[in-house]
């Protein structure tokens, strides 16, 4: 049983509700490692100009660590929020995580979003991490990070986390609590319920179906009830693969490779979305992790249009907006668009009309 001196309360996030319509509100941008960081900075600045609320930077596989591009975005923008989407809780000590997010907040006060995740296999296994009892690990890490960011001195004796009188020892800075909301990138329903209980928000995964969202909302509601709150107290941004092109076939083909890669490398997400096991097995024969571009292209030939449409917002600009609106109808509060192809075109398709020049 963990004993600790943490007393920080969960800070409730005010969620702006909206319904699907002609304009998608609270759009955000999701970036991985497909572009040089210098170009990602330009995309972020363009998204800010076009009224996007946030940019979420992936901690991509073993190719791009999230905090460095986050710092670059923070230093070159003025309004847009910047989140980690998401950083694993296994490879970094929670005190170091708290220090990292406090540093980012120093660079962009009140604009940083802390997104945490339980990572995935086979990558975790290949680097020697068994991911044993992920729910316990997540609960302990979130509690400790929250307390440290609240400017508390923390003693914690948990199953996985041990701290002895630790604080963020500001010497030359203002000693103040950091306004950094904590989000959990949850996929399974047990992690989703825990998120509803302990986090400020959830980062809902991409390549999932609306049916999956309905189950996720139920689990979040159950978790929130344990803390005497409701799902309305939780922000619910959702990663959405978005392939926009005036030619529908071109848009679907651009998304097909991404779908194929995740069918092979992260089948737990695909299973949760109701993808047929026969397709998962067929793709797994062609690619796993790591994969070459040739393997991804070979696997993509196995993925039918209906699976691409079920898992992504792809097609003409109008079709993509309609698909995103479907996620909003099913619980997403901020669509986080993962653009394939022309990033500027995707941002323009979802831009705040009042923000356009």
Image (spheres, rainbow, N blue to C red):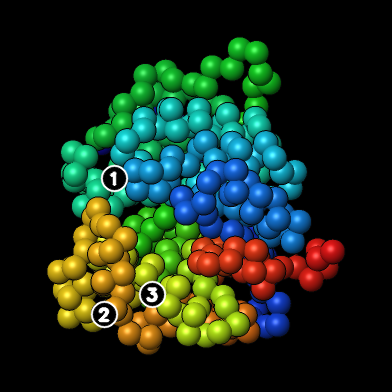
Q: Residue 136 carries which label?
A: 1
Q: What element carries label 2?
A: loop
Q: In which quarter of the image is residue 342?
A: bottom right
What is the C-alpha distance between the residues marked 1 and 3? 36 Å
Question: Left or right: where does residue 321 sit relative to residue 163?
Answer: right
Classify 222 as above or below 179.
below
| Quadrant of the image containing the C terminus | bottom right
Q: Residue at x 52, y 22 (%)?
A: 168
**Does the residue at mark 1 contact the one at mark 2 (Cβ under 8 Å)?**
no
Q: Which residue is drawn at 64% across and 69% down?
A: 345
What is the C-alpha distance between the residues marked 1 and 2? 38 Å
Q: Residues within 10 Å of mark 1 (few under 14, many from 20)?
A: some
Classify 281 as above or below 3.
below
Q: Residue 302 carries which label?
A: 2
Q: Which residue is drawn at 26% across and 61% down?
A: 265
**Does the residue at mark 1 contact the one at mark 3 (Cβ under 8 Å)?**
no
Q: Residues within 10 Å of mark 3 (few under 14, many from 20)?
A: many
């Amino acid at each position: 049983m963990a004993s600790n001196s943490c007393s920080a309360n969960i800070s409730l996030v005010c969620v702006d509700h909206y319904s699907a319509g002609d304009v998608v509100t609270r759009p955000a941008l999701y970036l991985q490692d497909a572009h040089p960081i210098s170009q990602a900075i330009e995309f972020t600045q363009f998204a800010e100009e076009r009224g996007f609320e946030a940019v979420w930077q992936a901690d991509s596989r073993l190719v791009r660590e999230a905090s460095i591009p986050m710092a670059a975005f923070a230093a070159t923008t003025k309004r847009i929020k910047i989140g980690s989407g998401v950083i694993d809780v296994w490879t970094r000590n929670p005190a170091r995580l708290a220090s990292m997010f406090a540093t980012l907040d120093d660079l962009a006060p009140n604009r940083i979003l802390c997104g945490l995740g339980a990572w995935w296999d086979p990558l975790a296994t290949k680097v020697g991490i068994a991911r044993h009892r992920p729910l316990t690990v997540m609960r302990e890490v979130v509690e400790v990070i929250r307390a440290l960011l609240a400017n508390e001195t923390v003693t914690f004796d948990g199953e996985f986390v041990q701290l002895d009188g630790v604080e963020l020892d500001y010497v030359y800075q203002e000693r103040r609590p950091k306004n950094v909301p904590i989000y959990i990138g949850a996929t399974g329903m047990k992690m989703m319920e825990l998120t509803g209980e302990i986090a400020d928000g959830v980062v809902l995964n991409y390549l999932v179906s609306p049916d999956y969202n309905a189950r996720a909302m139920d689990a979040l509601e159950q978790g929130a009830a344990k803390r005497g709150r409701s799902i309305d107290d939780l922000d619910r941004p959702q990663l959405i693969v978005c392939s926009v092109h005036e030619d529908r076939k071109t848009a679907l083909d651009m998304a097909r490779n991404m779908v194929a890669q995740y069918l092979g490398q992260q089948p737990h997400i695909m299973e949760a979305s109701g993808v047929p096991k026969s397709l998962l097995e067929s793709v797994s024969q062609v690619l796993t992790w790591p994969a070459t571009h040739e393997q991804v292209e070979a696997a993509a030939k196995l993925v039918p249009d209906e699976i691409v449409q079920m898992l992504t917002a792809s097609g003409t600009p109008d079709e993509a907006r309609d698909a995103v609106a479907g996620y909003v109808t099913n619980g997403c509060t901020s669509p986080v668009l993962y653009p394939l192809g022309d990033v500027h075109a995707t941002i323009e398709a979802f831009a705040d009309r009042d923000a356009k020049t």
